[in-house]
Image: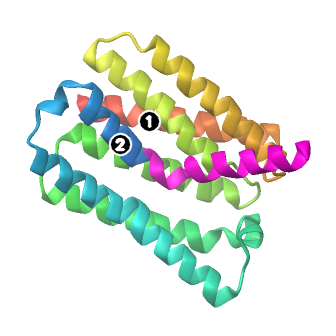
Amino acid sequence: MNNKRLIRIANTLSILFMPLYAPIWVIIGLFVFSYLSLLPLGYKIFLLATVYIFTIAIPTMGISLVRTVKKWTHMELSHREHRHMPYVLTLLSYSACLVLMTKMNTAMFFRGVVMAALVAQIICVVINAWWKVSTHMVGMGGLVGALHAFSLLFGYNPVWSFCILLLLSGALGTSRMILRQHSLAQVLVGFMIGYSCAMVFILICWM
């Protein structure tokens, strides 16, 4: 029973912190916890809808279609050799989102969030050629990196937020290992990829 409960909790955490959700969580955080909350509600809804469609809805539908055509289970889809098509679909959708945001002249720090996620995905595609990295932890590392970057830019103390996100990161990484999806090294590398990309590209886009 204890093992079943652990697996259930691990599955729940994996669903709640899907890697595709990272960009929209960052933007929601900006709208709630920064001066960007002063932006018009209509603009916030429009931007969130745009990011949701291109970073979550389209990749999710594309991956579901691939699973249906290939008749893969969720477990089979997680195999390294089966990850190429989902990665390509995600990269195309994120690229389209970035192009659209550029054409709409969206603020650079918003574009920096999507750009960081896109570059992190590209790194994962390259690594996936010989090794399997945890994209869940890439997403979580991106959240921590974005929090760090925006705390530097906006000049606020993120200690409590850091503590919460780091605890969640540990719980999620442990969950991925409990489900035997990744090793400790794959979890740590995934986190560092997400953290580094978020820090670098958000700070660069601010300049």
Identify the residue shown where x is 69% and y is 58%. 128
Query: In the image, is 88 to the left or to the right of 54?
Result: right
Q: Is residue 95 visible?
A: no
Which corner quadrant of the image does residue 110 belong to?
top left
Please identify the quadrant where the C terminus is shown.
Answer: top left
Q: Which residue is mark 1?
A: 198
Q: Mark 2 and 1 residues: CB-CB less than 8 Å, in contact?
A: yes
Label 1: state its secondary structure.
Answer: helix
Q: Position of residue 108 (x, y in %)?
A: 21, 40
Marks 2/1: CA–CA distance: 7 Å
Q: Position of residue 96 (x, y in %)?
A: 31, 66
- Residue closer to the observer: 146 or 165: 165
Amino acid identity at mark 2: Val
Q: Which residue is mark 2?
A: 113
Amino acid identity at mark 1: Ala
Part of the protein shown in magenta? 1-22
Does the magenta-highlighted stretch encompass residue 21? yes
Q: How many marks?
A: 2
Tell me the number on the disc at residue 141. Answer: none
| Residue lying at the far front of the rendered structure | 1
Q: Is residue 28 above or below residue 169?
A: below
- Residue closer to the observer: 108 or 207: 108
Q: Position of residue 197 (x, y in %)?
A: 47, 38
Identify the residue shown where x is 41% and y is 31%. 146
Label 2: state its secondary structure.
Answer: helix
Number of residues whose C-alpha sits closer than 10 Å to that of mark 2, classed few (under 14), some (14–19) or many (20 or more):
many
Most frequent secondary structure within the magenta stretch: helix
| Residue lying at the far bottom of the rendered structure | 69
Identify the residue shown where x is 69% and y is 33%. 171
